[in-house]
Amino acid sequence: MDEPTSSRQADQKQWREKFLTEVLQSENKKSSHYNDEEDLKKVIEEDCNVNLTEDSDDNVEEVSNQDEVCSSENEIQKARKTAAENLVKQAKKMKATSDKSHPPANIGDNVTIPIPDVDKGKGDLRNIIGVILQTNDEDQNSTFAIKLF
């Protein structure tokens, strides 16, 4: 997403510089007000925040400020970052709630594993009964054994 935005900004900046160079050249013909590259850079910096475009009636109107575009992009990035942080918080809260309601599994315990509706037919069981063979304390994962009849 950043590449199209940065290329668009580069195109806009290049167009602005070309436009201002043409304006300065025409101004230089009229007067020697702008003499060097520093004057050009100064004008570019002053006009950097305004994009001009022509509408269908050949009227020039102000479209938007570059600052507004940058600030909205910053707001979008902030919103994405906040959303990611909130998802992590929500996952931690869900994990803590689950850990409180479900006691830790011990080797040899019987457990029932629900089968999702999409994976079973009408005559299939709702749950599978299994026995815990092995637990992993780091990931809190367990290995189950299931005997099919």
Image (tube, rainbow, N blue to C red):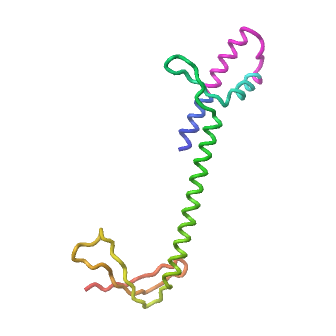
The secondary structure making up most of the magenta span is helix
Coordinates of residue 95 in the picture (x, y in percent)? 52, 74
Q: In front here: 55 or 26?
A: 55
Residue 46, quarter of the rendered image: top right
Image-based side of 111 in relation to 74, left or right: left
Instruction: Name the residue at the bottom extreme.
Output: 108
Asked if residue 74 is positioned above or below residue 27 in the image, the reply reads below
Coordinates of residue 28 in the picture (x, y in percent)? 73, 12
Residue in the image at 43% along x and 82% along y: 143
Coordinates of residue 18 in the picture (x, y in percent)? 63, 22
Residue 6, quarter of the rendered image: top right
Asked if residue 10 is positioned above or below residue 98 in the image, the reply reads above
Residue in the image at 53% along x and 68% along y: 91
Whether residue 26 is in magenta: the answer is yes
First to last magenta residue range: 14-38
Whether residue 75 is in magenta: the answer is no
Residue in the image at 67% along x and 19% along y: 21
Asked if residue 103 is positioned above or below residue 63 in the image, the reply reads below
Tally of numbered tags: 0
Q: Quadrant of the C terminus?
A: bottom left
